[in-house]
Amino acid sequence: MGQATLSMRVDDTLKKKFDMICDDFGLTSTAAITVFMKTVVRERRIPFEIKASGRDQINKEAWEAFLEMRTQAAAAGVQDLTLDEINAEIQNARNER
């Protein structure tokens, strides 16, 4: 079976930490990545759960912040301003300083 070269860029700190953990397992990083690749091919899936931890909470918080700003804009009567009008308001406020 022929050999192929896999070249990729990763964060230097991540690579060093990965190499140290692989060394603790008695593996090279190449061997660990090969094990990962063989498992993906054999099982036809990523062999661990991938999820965006905290993302739903961040999205919820961002949405709530957006709704709060929208409420404040409506209370101030500026909810229908265009971007150009908003920029003009900002410029006017700066000019008044």
Image (spheres, grey):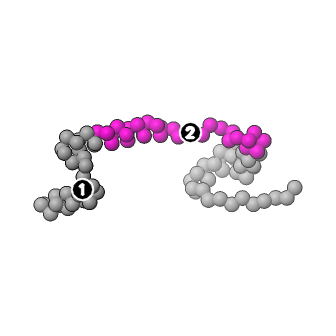
Kindly identify the residue that appears in the image at 71 percent across and 49 percent down.
Answer: 33
Determine crowd level at label 2: few under 14, some 14-19, many 20+ residues with C-alpha closer than 10 A: few
Which residue does the numbered mark 2 point to in the structure image?
Answer: 51
Tell me the quarter of the image containing the C terminus.
bottom left
Outermost residue to the bottom? 95
Image position, residue 56 (x, y; %): 46, 37
Outermost residue to the left? 96
Per the image, label 2 sits on a secondary structure element best described as loop
Kindly identify the residue that appears in the image at 43 percent across and 36 percent down.
Answer: 57
Which residue does the numbered mark 1 point to in the structure image?
Answer: 86
Kindly identify the residue that appears in the image at 19 percent across and 45 percent down.
Answer: 77
Main secondary structure of the magenta stretch: helix
Along the viewing direction, whichever of 80 and 47 lies nearer the viewer? 80
The span shown in magenta is: 40-68
Q: Earlier in the sequence, mark 1 or mark 2?
A: 2
Image position, residue 86 (x, y; %): 24, 56
- Residue 30 among those drawn in magenta: no
Along the viewing direction, whichever of 38 and 59 lies nearer the viewer? 59
Q: Is residue 48 visible?
A: yes
Image position, residue 76 (x, y; %): 18, 44
